Amino acid sequence: MKKTISIILLFLLGFGVIAQPLTERQRLLGTVACLEAQGDLDRLAEAINQSLDGGITVSELKESFSHLYAYTGFPRSLNALGTLARVLHERDLSGIAYPEGRPWTRPAQWGDATRTMALGTDIQTRLNGQPFNLTFCPQSDYYLKAHLFGDIFASDILSAADREILTVGALMGQRGTEPQLQSHKRGAVNLGNSADAVAELCLYLIDNGYAMQGYASDANAGDWEKGKPNKEYAQYFTGQSHTATVKPANLTENEQSVLPFTNVTFEPRCRNNWHIHHGARQILVCVSGRGWYQEWGKEPIELHAGMVIEIPEGVKHWHGAQRDSWFQHLTAHIASDKQQSVEWLEPVDDGYYNKLR
């Protein structure tokens, strides 16, 4: 499902970067990176054409695909460069102009191991917000500092902020890289992008069917059946949710009738209102994506697949998806009284929710 996402920026981020919406340049760079990571060369060719039409230069695209080899491997990097060469040849034959950009020059730091290590250490420290040392594997620690953040980041064809947008886009295009994605989303902010722009890029890649993380489309909303739109309780939700009845195979028919499970799928940004369960406690079994759970007066808890939350009777709380990910949980209610009810309260404040990182 495609959405038009509008973020009104009203506050300064603690990172020192004034919040700004996603720019066209960031969107184009993030898209080509996401498709390069997947090896989807047909759609990559389309995205390259859109990037050239949008003002991204040939030099910047060459540098982008060279940069991405560190995150996606040389095969996909070289395939992307070959696709770029093909697109340029086709545009030449058709007489379609494109911006060349300034030529690449060898960085001055290359050949000086001390300077390269110093540059890489500085960039890695800024990206992480603090010094980082992989003492468990010294050789990888050296490669990261001297080569990735030293050699590769030394080229001034792209800024450090651009490179992190590329990296986030590429990680959104892969599965199994969730820890690195979360780290680089923070790093993208630390190196000059706004948190809202990074979140909006991830949403754009999800909503337009590019991403592999975040569960990219209606047809692939998560690992469990999405079910039907949650119309019955829509008035108590911000955003769109879906529900489906779940019958675990290892439960007897009698057990299923006593403890029925419902799968609730939250689209990105969707969450329910603050509410209280009376006469029952609630069990949440998180199965896909990333979400939030919060009890009144306590800090929010970040949710991910495999977590189980038990919500005591009478506790005011809310739960839902994070801003840039689908989220699914199974839910069941264990009665403590014959009279059961849900007391629906106020929505979770948009300003508060949007600040959750």
Image (tube, helix red, strand yellow):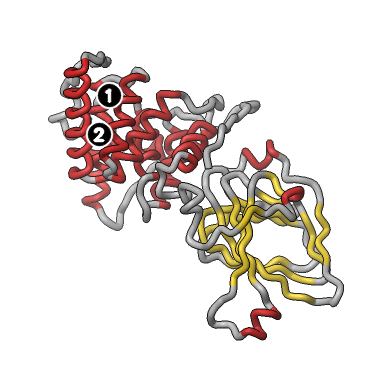
Residue drawn at 40 percent across, 37 percent down = 127
Report the quarter where the C terminus lies.
top right
For the point 40% across and 24% down, the residue is 25
Judge from the rendering whether residue 125 lies leftward or rightward of residue 196; answer left or right: left
Q: Residues within 10 Å of mark 2 (few under 14, many from 20)?
A: many
Pointer 1 residue: 60
Q: Report if the CB atoms under discs 2 and 1 are less than 8 Å apart.
A: no
Identify the residue under disc 2. Answer: 65
Position in image of residue 14 (x %, y %): 57, 33
Figure quadrant of residue 149? top left
- Image quarter of residue 79: top left
Question: In this orientation, does residue 151 appear?
Answer: no
**Which of 347/144 is in front?**
347
Q: Is mark 2 on a helix, strand or loop?
A: helix
Q: Which residue is drawn at 60% across and 52% down?
A: 266
When the figure is inspected, residue 73 is found, relative to residue 106, above or below; the finding is below
Q: Quadrant of residue 192?
A: top left
Which numbered tag is attached to residue 289?
none
Among all residues in the image, which is located at the extreme right? 339
Amino acid type, residue under disc 1 in the picture:
Glu
Q: Please provide percent x and percent y for residue 261.
A: 64, 71
